[in-house]
Image: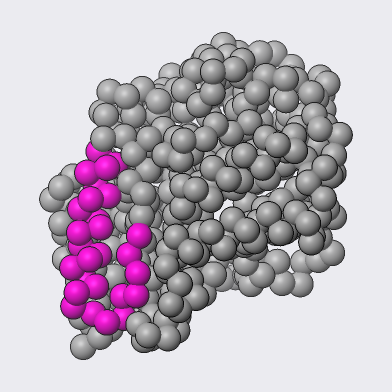
Amino acid sequence: MDDHGVLLQTAIPGPKSMEILERRNKYVARGISNNCHSFVNRANGALVEDVDGNTYIDFAGAIGTINVGHCHPKVVQAIQEQASQFIHTGFNVMMYESYIDLAERLCELAPGDFAKKAAFFNSGAEAVENAVKLARKYTNRPGVISFTRGFHGRTLMTMTMTSKVKPYKFGFGPFAPEVYKAPYPYVYRRPEGMSEQQYIDMTIEQFEQFLLAEVAPETIAAVVMEPVQGEGGFIVPDLRFVQRVREICSQYGILFVADEIQTGFARTGDYFAINHFGVVPDLMTISKSMGAGVPISGVIGRAEVLDAAAPGEIGGTYAGSPLGCRAALAVLDIIESERLNERAQLIGAKVMGKMNELASIYECVGDVRGLGAMCAMELVKDRQTKAPDKEAVSKIVKAAGERGLLLLSAGLYGNVIRFLMPLTITDEQLETGFQILEEAFAVVYH
């Protein structure tokens, strides 16, 4: 595989991928979606090669899972060493030191000068589920507040907390009780004629009114917030809004939970995105890039909250697997040694520059936004009406894919292009990806 970038040997998808696709359609459930119809053969850094020999530049990062790049040598070595020693004992049956090492390092990295503990699981949704369990156990309260456009998973509880109805919730009810959705600021779509400051004032007031009109704060165990909304369209909230929500949580004894599953592990230019907002959460949920592709997730937070559950009340057969723990420890080493927090800021600046350049050419680009290397552009049919253009995003993603660039959409309206390239991407690969993005725009808006 050429390290420099895109190499197309066939049309995309190629003949071998098409053959496997037929089998996929015959044997794999229809409800599992696929963004790209090619099949991977190998991947390295920010490059992915399919079974037909086509090489792609990856701006999707396995939906934010590969911040340190595909098959980073340190991660591969850690997994191989662990697999040669033992693959699984079940932490509940016989413990292993890597679990303790990972808990110690993450507790030291997590914000807050109080005593902290951690517990590990398998997926992001499982981490959120357990954060809710712990919050309810600790506070002896039933209620949970999440936010409009938030995404927290596909299990019963997390699907209930998730805001987007289709495709995540439609037809899958009834849902979990005592889950409430509060408004979350979306500055780009504020009422016409209202300043940003006026709008933030209004959203803060709406949240305060929410606790009068919808649910009593004394019944709420936790407020769960993505510091930057992921699936919701990479919406970056105002600092004052986040800080006011934190103040209200403290006032009423509500646990503030930062969902860092997509935002964590250097994506925004810090280990955790919540650090940008000057607040300290009681709990954090983590996953995705935590294991560089090996399934692992966790809850980190106040020791007394983590200890609210008695032995056996949280955990799972594969929770905090040895392979996941070793991979996660390698990820932390890589972020530090390769200064990926700084790299994320540099990548983010380049992406923002390219998005602004496209916005100056194409009227369809209604908004560009981001925090660190968590960036997105929102496409509209008209800048005055801001009517979402989901169809254009689908066409651009498809056109980019046919030219060897993996892209993802997002947003409540499906009209946002989000960028989650590995933070180890080279400048040359980044520029090649930008060129393909420009070509995709030109094809769609010829």
- Per the picture, the main secondary structure of the magenta-coloured stretch is helix
Image-based side of 240 in relation to 183, left or right: left
In the rendered image, residue 22, in percent from the top left (x then y), is placed at 50, 71
Residue closest to the eye, 395 or 28:
395
The one of 375 and 384 positioned closer to us in this rendering: 384
Q: Nearer the viewer, residue 94 or 42?
A: 94
What is the x, y in percent for residue 267? 38, 42
Reply above or below: 249 against 164.
Answer: above
User: Left or right of 133: which side holds 357?
Assistant: left
Which residue lies at the image location 66% right of the left edge and 42% below the top edge? Answer: 248
In this picture the colour scheme is: one colour
What range is drawn magenta here?
A: 343-369
Give the number of marks: 0
Residue 342, position as x, y percentages in the image: 26, 35
Task: For the C terminus, give its image quadrant.
Answer: bottom left
The magenta stretch spans residue 110:
no
Residue 126 visible in the shown view: no
